[in-house]
Structures are given as C-alpha cells and as structure tokens.
Image (spheres, rainbow, N blue to C red):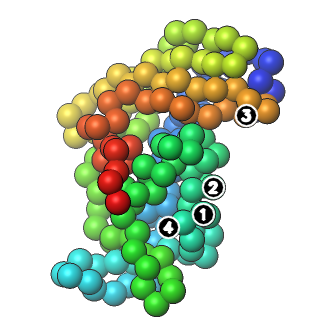
C-alpha cells in the first residue's frame, strides 16, 4: 500500500477491506487439514504452526485490525489448547457478509479514512458496513466497524 500521506483509491481500499474481512476465515480454515480430536461432543482441528499461539494469531489480525478488534476476533475463534497445541472447531461457520461489492469513501484526511461498503456473502443478503481506518507509518488499520454485534467474528467477547 502507498504511504500515509498519499490518498487511497476506491480499489485499494476495496482490496484492503476484502483482505481484512477474510482473515478470521483464513485462520479458521487453516485448521482443515490438521489433526483432530473430540471434546464435549465437538470436533476440533489443530491450527498450523503459523497460528500456534495467541500472539501469532493476534499479529496476523493486526495486519488489518486494531488491537481491540484483533482480540475480539481471536476470542470469537474460540481456540482451545490441547497437548500444547492450539485447536479450533472444525464445523462450518454460518455465512456472514464479507466481500465488498461496492465502496464509497466518505472522508479521507491525513490520518483517517471513513468508508461505507456494501458487503455480500451473508445469508440475509447484502449489508452496508461503515469502517473507520487510520493511516499510520505507511499502513492502514481498521479501528471501527459498524454492525459488530450482529457478526460473530467481531462481537464483544467476555472470555
């Protein structure tokens, strides 16, 4: 991505948000070929080494998301430790809106960008989501996303 002083284009922001929205699923699906075990009637699959610790997963989410949102995403993955390894449920999560169909830049300033994006992929059809992004050190970070309580990846987590 261009440095923070440069104005971002719709196509650059679309690509960034598409990448960000897929991150939770990338971690979850990376366990599909991993070893599995059953716990309390649920099947869990082992995450690969690149996601073998809480810090590695948070760092991966941190490529696009703020620390707080990265922690919510990690918590909502609901990973468990078993025999020194990190596992996630092997079931298929319900569909949620996650692919940008259209994007409008609402405001772009020296350090922040506000956008509105129509996302597809959810069971209830397209959904309009607003994002606030910061531009620091030549990189973008999503610091706010609307409709978080209705999307299990970003819901406030208590554990």
Helix, strand or loop status at disc 1 = helix
Residue denoted by label 2: 59
Can see residue 94? yes
Q: Quadrant of residue 113?
A: top right
- Badge 2 local density, few (<14 within 10 Å), some, or many (20+)? some
Residue denoted by label 3: 139
Q: Are marks 2 and 4 in contact (CB under 8 Å)?
A: no
Helix, strand or loop status at disc 3 = strand
- Badge 1 local density, few (<14 within 10 Å), some, or many (20+)? few
Number of on-image labels: 4
Q: Which label number is shown at residue 30?
A: 4
Q: Is residue 93 left or right of residue 62?
A: left
Between the C-alphas of marks 3 and 1, the distance is: 20 Å
Residue denoted by label 1: 55
Q: Earlier in the sequence, mark 3 or mark 1?
A: 1
Give percent across and percent down for residue 19: 56, 42
Q: Earlier in the sequence, mark 2 or mark 4?
A: 4
Helix, strand or loop status at disc 4 = loop
Q: Are marks 1 and 2 in contact (CB under 8 Å)?
A: yes
Q: Is residue 111 above or below residue 137?
A: above
């Amino acid at each position: 991505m261009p440095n923070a002083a440069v104005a971002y284009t719709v196509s650059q922001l679309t690509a960034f948000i598409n990448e960000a929205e897929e991150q939770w699923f990338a971690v979850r699906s990376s366990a599909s070929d991993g070893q599995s075990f059953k716990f309390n009637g649920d099947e869990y699959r082992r995450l690969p080494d690149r996601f073998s610790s809480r810090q590695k997963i948070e760092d991966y989410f941190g490529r696009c998301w703020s620390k707080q949102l990265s922690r919510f995403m990690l918590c909502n993955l609901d990973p468990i430790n078993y025999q020194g390894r990190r596992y996630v449920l092997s079931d298929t999560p319900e569909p949620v809106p996650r692919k940008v169909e259209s994007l409008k830049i609402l405001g772009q300033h020296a350090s922040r960008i506000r956008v509105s994006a129509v996302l597809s992929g959810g069971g209830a059809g397209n959904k309009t989501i607003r994002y606030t992004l910061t531009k620091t050190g030549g990189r973008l970070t999503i610091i706010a996303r609307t409709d978080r309580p209705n999307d299990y990846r970003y819901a406030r987590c208590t554990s």
